[in-house]
Image (tube, grey):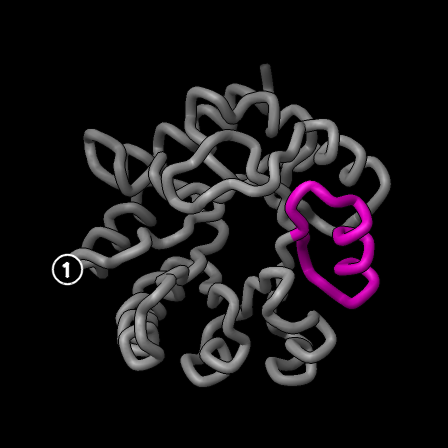
């Protein structure tokens, strides 16, 4: 089983000097991808934030994905897009962003939506929420079994999202999640974002080999 990796999502609003925080976080350990998720921000603000984020992430080999907006992913030069169920389909995103782009799709707790996304050419599917989260209202609750089912049936990677921390992530890693998407576990870590990344990586490693 390949090791699970960390998938970082930006805080809902970026504090001043966020690029430095991000650099410290990414230097804290292994991070596969970073999603720019700034709900409610203007297009200009999102593009400005992304322009500051991209060089920091890409210099460290971390893919940057735009949340929801394939048009902004294209304009900003992101490595791909993460689509919610109402944000257009992977076929359109692929056409706009090209063959090299990474395209992910939110599938909540639905096997059907995940299979549809895979058939439409998604590079990964995201399931959740697995735990309560303060970042958004949880309408869909997923169980680890869906990760197990997906990873046994399909080659396309799966991402687990929703309230994931170093303390509760082990069942998701063991069920076959390829990536764990986190926000608070890193940005709200009492010792700072680099410590948050280290703690998540240590928990993933322990669960993978435990």
Q: Nearer the viewer, residue 65 or 139?
A: 139
115 inside magenta stretch: yes
**Which residue is under mark 1?**
17
How many neighbours does mark 1 have within 10 angstroms: few (below 14), some (14-19), or many (20 or more)?
few
- Residue range in magenta is 107-125
Residue 116 versus residue 129 in the image, above or below:
below
| Position in image of residue 145 (x %, y %) | 73, 28
Residue drawn at x 78%, y 40% as measured from the top left: 150
| Position in image of residue 47 (x %, y %) | 33, 78
Q: Quadrant of residue 15?
A: bottom left
30 to the left or right of 174: left
57 to the left or right of 14: right
Residue drawn at x 69%, y 79% as measured from the top left: 92
Q: Quadrant of residue 18?
A: bottom left
Count the marks: 1
Residue 185 versus residue 210 in the image, above or below:
below
Work out which residue is located at the far top of the displayed protein and give it: 210
- Name the quarter where the C terminus is drawn: top right
| Position in image of residue 27 (x %, y %) | 30, 47
188 to the left or right of 142: left
122 inside magenta stretch: yes
Q: Secondary structure at mark 1?
A: loop
Residue drawn at x 27%, y 54% as measured from the top left: 22
| Position in image of residue 105 (x %, y %) | 64, 58
- Name the quarter where the N terminus is drawn: top right
């Amino acid at each position: 089983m390949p090791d699970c990796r960390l998938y970082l999502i930006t805080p809902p609003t970026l504090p001043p000097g966020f690029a430095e925080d991000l650099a410290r976080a990414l230097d804290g350990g292994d991070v596969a991808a970073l999603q720019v998720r700034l709900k409610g921000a203007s297009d200009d603000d999102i593009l400005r934030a992304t322009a500051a984020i991209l060089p920091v992430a890409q210099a460290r080999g971390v893919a940057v994905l735009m949340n929801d907006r394939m048009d902004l992913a294209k304009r900003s030069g992101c490595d791909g897009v993460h689509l919610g169920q109402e944000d257009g389909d992977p076929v359109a995103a692929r056409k706009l962003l090209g063959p090299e782009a990474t395209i992910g799709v939110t599938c909540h707790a639905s096997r059907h939506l995940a299979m549809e996304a895979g058939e439409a050419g998604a590079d990964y599917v995201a399931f959740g929420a697995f735990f309560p989260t303060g970042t958004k209202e949880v309408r869909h609750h997923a169980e680890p079994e869906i990760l197990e089912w997906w990873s046994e049936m399909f080659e396309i990677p799966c991402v687990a999202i929703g309230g994931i921390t170093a303390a509760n992530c082990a069942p998701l890693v063991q069920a076959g999640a390829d990536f764990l998407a986190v926000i608070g576990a890193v940005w709200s870590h009492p010792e700072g974002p680099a410590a948050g990344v280290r703690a998540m990586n240590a928990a993933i490693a322990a669960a993978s080999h435990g």
